[in-house]
Amino acid sequence: MLRSLNQFIKLQRLVVGCKRLYLTKVWGMDIHPTVVMSLSARLDKTHPRGIHIGEGTYIAFDAAILAHDMTRAIKTDTRIGKNCFIGARSIILPGVTIGDNCVIGSGAVVTKDIPPNSAAAGNPAQVIRSGIETLKFGRLKDRVKE
Protein backbone atom coordinates (compact mmCIF):
# COMPACT_ATOMS: atom_id res chain seq x y z
CA MET A 1 0.00 0.00 0.00
CA LEU A 2 1.40 3.38 -1.03
CA ARG A 3 1.54 5.84 1.85
CA SER A 4 2.11 9.54 1.87
CA LEU A 5 5.64 10.90 1.57
CA ASN A 6 4.88 12.83 4.76
CA GLN A 7 5.90 9.70 6.64
CA PHE A 8 9.49 10.66 5.80
CA ILE A 9 9.28 14.23 7.13
CA LYS A 10 11.29 13.41 10.26
CA LEU A 11 14.04 11.83 8.18
CA GLN A 12 14.03 14.82 5.80
CA ARG A 13 14.29 17.28 8.71
CA LEU A 14 17.18 15.28 10.16
CA VAL A 15 19.08 15.33 6.86
CA VAL A 16 18.41 19.06 6.40
CA GLY A 17 19.59 19.65 9.97
CA CYS A 18 22.83 17.84 9.13
CA LYS A 19 23.25 19.99 6.00
CA ARG A 20 22.68 23.16 8.05
CA LEU A 21 25.19 22.00 10.67
CA TYR A 22 27.73 21.26 7.93
CA LEU A 23 27.23 24.70 6.34
CA THR A 24 27.57 26.53 9.66
CA LYS A 25 30.36 24.54 11.32
CA VAL A 26 32.52 23.64 8.31
CA TRP A 27 31.88 26.60 6.00
CA GLY A 28 31.14 29.27 8.65
CA MET A 29 27.78 30.44 7.30
CA ASP A 30 25.43 32.30 9.65
CA ILE A 31 22.26 30.18 9.43
CA HIS A 32 19.78 30.18 12.32
CA PRO A 33 18.99 26.67 13.68
CA THR A 34 15.28 27.02 12.78
CA VAL A 35 15.95 27.56 9.05
CA VAL A 36 14.50 24.85 6.80
CA MET A 37 15.91 24.41 3.32
CA SER A 38 15.62 22.03 0.45
CA LEU A 39 18.53 19.67 0.01
CA SER A 40 18.98 21.13 -3.49
CA ALA A 41 19.24 24.75 -2.27
CA ARG A 42 22.63 26.18 -3.22
CA LEU A 43 24.46 28.52 -0.86
CA ASP A 44 27.68 30.26 -1.94
CA LYS A 45 30.79 28.41 -0.81
CA THR A 46 33.19 30.87 -2.48
CA HIS A 47 32.47 33.43 0.27
CA PRO A 48 30.53 31.36 2.83
CA ARG A 49 30.95 33.79 5.75
CA GLY A 50 28.90 36.29 3.74
CA ILE A 51 25.70 34.23 3.99
CA HIS A 52 23.34 35.29 6.83
CA ILE A 53 19.87 33.71 7.17
CA GLY A 54 17.44 34.60 9.98
CA GLU A 55 15.20 32.39 12.07
CA GLY A 56 12.05 30.75 10.73
CA THR A 57 13.06 31.12 7.07
CA TYR A 58 12.31 28.54 4.37
CA ILE A 59 14.47 28.11 1.26
CA ALA A 60 12.79 26.09 -1.50
CA PHE A 61 14.41 23.75 -4.02
CA ASP A 62 17.12 24.97 -6.40
CA ALA A 63 17.25 28.45 -4.83
CA ALA A 64 20.72 30.02 -5.10
CA ILE A 65 22.06 32.50 -2.56
CA LEU A 66 25.30 34.21 -3.60
CA ALA A 67 27.78 36.30 -1.62
CA HIS A 68 30.43 36.84 -4.29
CA ASP A 69 30.73 38.10 -7.87
CA MET A 70 33.87 36.92 -9.64
CA THR A 71 33.45 39.32 -12.58
CA ARG A 72 33.62 42.37 -10.29
CA ALA A 73 35.92 40.75 -7.69
CA ILE A 74 33.32 41.38 -4.96
CA LYS A 75 32.90 39.39 -1.76
CA THR A 76 30.08 40.82 0.32
CA ASP A 77 27.36 39.92 2.81
CA THR A 78 23.98 38.68 1.64
CA ARG A 79 21.28 38.79 4.32
CA ILE A 80 17.87 37.14 4.54
CA GLY A 81 15.66 38.21 7.46
CA LYS A 82 13.38 36.30 9.80
CA ASN A 83 10.24 34.42 8.71
CA CYS A 84 10.96 34.65 4.98
CA PHE A 85 10.07 32.33 2.12
CA ILE A 86 12.57 32.05 -0.74
CA GLY A 87 10.81 30.47 -3.72
CA ALA A 88 12.00 27.62 -5.91
CA ARG A 89 14.75 28.41 -8.41
CA SER A 90 15.08 31.99 -7.25
CA ILE A 91 18.49 33.67 -7.26
CA ILE A 92 19.59 36.08 -4.54
CA LEU A 93 22.56 38.10 -5.84
CA PRO A 94 25.52 39.19 -3.69
CA GLY A 95 25.10 42.12 -1.32
CA VAL A 96 21.31 41.96 -1.26
CA THR A 97 19.39 42.33 2.01
CA ILE A 98 15.92 40.80 2.22
CA GLY A 99 14.02 42.21 5.20
CA ASP A 100 12.05 40.26 7.79
CA ASN A 101 8.69 38.70 6.81
CA CYS A 102 9.28 38.67 3.05
CA VAL A 103 8.13 36.31 0.32
CA ILE A 104 10.30 35.91 -2.78
CA GLY A 105 8.46 34.33 -5.71
CA SER A 106 9.68 31.29 -7.58
CA GLY A 107 12.20 32.08 -10.30
CA ALA A 108 12.81 35.62 -9.03
CA VAL A 109 16.21 37.20 -9.57
CA VAL A 110 16.75 39.53 -6.60
CA THR A 111 19.21 42.24 -7.64
CA LYS A 112 18.52 44.85 -4.96
CA ASP A 113 17.33 45.08 -1.36
CA ILE A 114 13.75 44.07 -0.52
CA PRO A 115 12.15 46.00 2.37
CA PRO A 116 10.59 44.15 5.32
CA ASN A 117 6.99 42.87 5.02
CA SER A 118 7.10 42.67 1.21
CA ALA A 119 6.42 40.17 -1.54
CA ALA A 120 8.71 40.34 -4.58
CA ALA A 121 8.77 38.46 -7.88
CA GLY A 122 10.11 38.70 -11.40
CA ASN A 123 13.39 39.14 -13.22
CA PRO A 124 14.66 41.47 -11.94
CA ALA A 125 12.58 41.08 -8.80
CA GLN A 126 10.25 43.94 -7.94
CA VAL A 127 8.10 44.46 -4.88
CA ILE A 128 4.58 43.46 -5.90
CA ARG A 129 2.98 43.85 -2.49
CA SER A 130 3.90 45.69 0.71
CA GLY A 131 2.60 45.49 4.25
CA ILE A 132 2.23 41.71 4.31
CA GLU A 133 2.37 39.75 7.55
CA THR A 134 4.02 36.37 7.68
CA LEU A 135 4.36 33.57 10.16
CA LYS A 136 7.22 31.10 10.46
CA PHE A 137 8.62 29.97 7.08
CA GLY A 138 7.03 32.94 5.33
CA ARG A 139 3.47 31.64 5.51
CA LEU A 140 1.00 34.46 5.01
CA LYS A 141 -1.19 35.24 8.00
CA ASP A 142 -4.83 34.50 7.41
CA ARG A 143 -6.80 37.70 7.29
CA VAL A 144 -9.90 37.71 9.42
CA LYS A 145 -12.92 39.11 7.59
CA GLU A 146 -14.83 41.58 9.66
Image: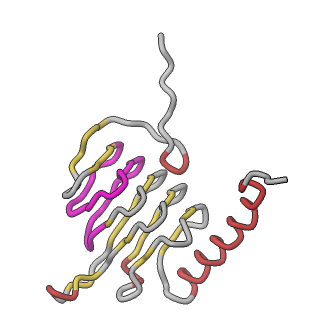
* Number of numbered discs on residues: 0
In the rendered view, tell whether residue 25 sits above or below residue 89: below
Residue 46: give x, y in percent of width and height.
Answer: 36, 89
Q: Residue at x 59, y 83 (%)?
A: 22
Between 32 and 15, the one nearer to me in the picture: 15
Q: Which residues are magenta?
A: 92-117
Residue found at the far left of this picture? 72
Q: Main secondary structure of the magenta part?
A: loop
On the image, the x and y values in percent for residue 111 come to: 21, 63
Q: Residue at x 58, y 85 (%)?
A: 25
Image quadrant where residue 91 sits: bottom left
Residue at 53% from the left image edge and 59% from the top image edge: 55
- From the top left corner, tell me how far across and down residue 18 is, in percent: 66, 77
Image position of 67 with respect to 33: above or below: below
Residue at horizontal 25 percent and vertical 41 percent from the top: 128
Give residue 32's quadrant in the image: bottom right
